[in-house]
Image (cartoon, helix red, strand yellow):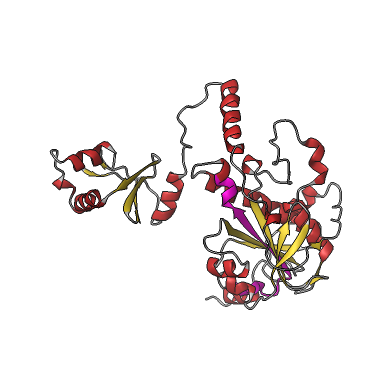
Amino acid sequence: MQIAPYIFILPRTPATVVWDYKNHKQFELNLAYSIRLTELINNPDNFDNSSPIDAQLFAAGILTTLASERLIWGWDELSKIFHIGTKNIPCSHVPENTAEWASIYLEHCKKTLDIPPPLARTSIKHVDAPLIHLPTPLKLPEHSLIHVLFIRKTCRTFTGEPVSLQAISTILYLCLGYLKERINTIDESVAQGLEARRSSPSGGGLNACEGFLYAQNIEGLQPGIYAYNAAEHTLSLVNQQINQSLGHVLSGQHFINNLPAGLFITCRFDKLWWKYEHSRAYRMAYVEAGHISQTFQLVATALGLSTWLTGALTDHQVESLLNIEENNPEQALFFLGCGKSDGQVMCKELKSLLNNRG
């Protein structure tokens, strides 16, 4: 007898939660069951066939007689739990054909829409400050995509020159804005209230990702952190006090401290949980952020700006900067920056170390 290999134990007063994360099964154990499980973890050979508790732990799959699977993963147990725990969407029945899938999916959507959706970003009041209406986005050069794909690269040296508010307006609109140019493309399959369309795909059409503009040197805009309101194409001031360097809140990457502008991509997880009641939805948050990230880089490059990006956030400091509480359903995922650059992919300090090797 042994403990099943894909078990995660979570203490949550007054019970112990045991999660079989591979098979998407969860159990709550009272004190007697928790004590007995601890004893069996210490020595599985003490399993007693005559014990009702042991028998129930075995029937639940928490204990097993099967040989332990050896998954070659590496040292990071947390990422293994995440990866396996978000595999194989749990469903009681897999559709056999398209008609059956359509019927099941429509029923799911109806049940979802019976529940009020989370409040939109514009319903959240960040600070007592007026909305800032952004200028009309610029038109990008026609047939520029292939050129932009060839020349886009990550830069780590920026000149500190200001960027125009119109360029930032263009980037925000094409990355996160609800595109008025797509209004006529909405068909009858789109549920009322979910008509908004961005340039990038979004899981379930929920547009769960949002953005906070980091403004350090943008012409016509006071330095600070601004929430971008996609529906109105406006900014609302969130934090005027940027007391720490950008590199400080991005895990010490101080080579970008003079970056004039950037975008923190966040996710409204409450939007995802509203429609998708399974852990795999968490994967989709990062997929959506990746789509937006690529669009940001391509649009900025088309506007003659260089870009830099990172997922190395000092999360609690970023949350403080954005005025996001730790228990808020909106959380930061990624950061992108843009500005004028000399095109260097390495900061001068790293380049100097490499040149002086040996």
Quarter of the picture holding the N terminus: top left
Residue 259's spot in the image, x, y percent? 71, 71
Residue 3's spot in the image, x, y percent? 26, 46
**Left or right, 62 with reference to 170:** left
Residue 348 visible in the displayed image: yes
Residue sitting at x 59%, y 74%: 248
**Left or right, 253 with reference to 53:** right
Write down the region rendered in magenta. 253-273
Asked whether 266 falls inside the magenta stretch, the response is yes
All told, the count of numbered labels is 0
Does residue 286 lie above or below 95 as drawn? Answer: below
Residue nearest the observer in this picture, 52 or 295: 52
Residue nearest the observer in this picture, 351 or 90: 90
**Left or right, 171 with reference to 318:** right
Asked whether 122 falls inside the magenta stretch, the response is no
Does residue 197 lie above or below 230 as drawn? Answer: above
**Left or right, 10 with reference to 179:** left
Residue 216's spot in the image, x, y percent? 73, 72
Residue 238's spot in the image, x, y percent? 68, 67
Can you tell which quarter of the image residue 132 is in?
bottom right
Residue nearest the observer in this picture, 331 or 335: 331
Residue sitting at x 23%, y 39%: 56
Residue sitting at x 86%, y 56%: 136
Residue 301 visible in the displayed image: no
